[in-house]
Image (cartoon, grey):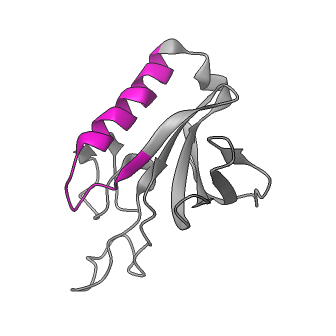
Amino acid sequence: MSDVTTRAFAGGRYVVEREIARGGMATVFLAHDRELDRPVAVKVLDARLADDEDVAGRFRREALTAARLAHPNVVQVYDAGEEAGEPFIVMEVVEASRSPPSSPAPAGSRPSACATSACRRPRPSGTRTSTGSCTGT
């Protein structure tokens, strides 16, 4: 994953620090919210898919759906928008567990990060969340 230090979203409010995940449809960056002085995850729809209205519509619905959820297993959505034709979703950052994905997390530990599919805790393979699939990695 590349180190991205010059990108920003929402008029410079969210300043990208580095890439933390990349998938077939989107890239997730660790960023800093300059207004609230906190780390955030910014999920950006791949530019080659942003022109596809079906895909862009699903991405917007993902943001709306996740923003309406309040559950300990779902990351909180803080913001969403579009910057230079690229739709993005701003979410809370959840630190990854140090446990291997195949083993359960120790009692009292933080759950695995899975910001790209808006879930927090490892789930059995193939289990779907409201916004995507999560394997707990």
Location of residue 64 in the rendering, given as x and y in whole percent from the top left corner: 33, 33
Query: Furthest-right residue in view?
Result: 6
- Give the dominant element type of the magenta stretch: helix, strand or loop: helix
Kindly indicate the quadrant of the structure image that contains residue 34: bottom right
Q: Residue 94: where, in percent of width, then height?
A: 41, 67
Where is 25 relative to 93, above or below? above
Q: Position of residue 28 (x, y in %)?
A: 56, 51
Q: In which quarter of the image is the C terminus?
A: bottom left
Q: Quadrant of the N terminus?
A: bottom right
Residue 66 vertical placement versus 96 (above, below): above
Q: Residue at x 80, y 53 (%)?
A: 6
Query: Magenta span has 61?
Result: yes
For the record, the magenta segment spans: 54-78
Quarter of the rendering containing residue 133: top left
Q: In this view, does 120 lie above or below 83?
A: below
Q: Can residue 23 be seen in this view?
A: no
Identity of the residue furthest to the top in this view: 53
Residue sitting at x 68%, y 56%: 16
> Is residue 80 shown in magenta?
no
Side (left or right) of 12 relative to 105: right
Residue pictured at 39% horizontal, 36% vertical? 63
**Residue 18 appears anywhere in the view:** yes
Q: Residue at x 37, y 69 (%)?
A: 112
Q: Which of 109 and 61 is in front in this view?
A: 61
Q: In the depicted view, which residue is nearer to us: 84 or 132?
A: 84
Question: Residue 106, how many percent across, how many down?
Answer: 26, 85
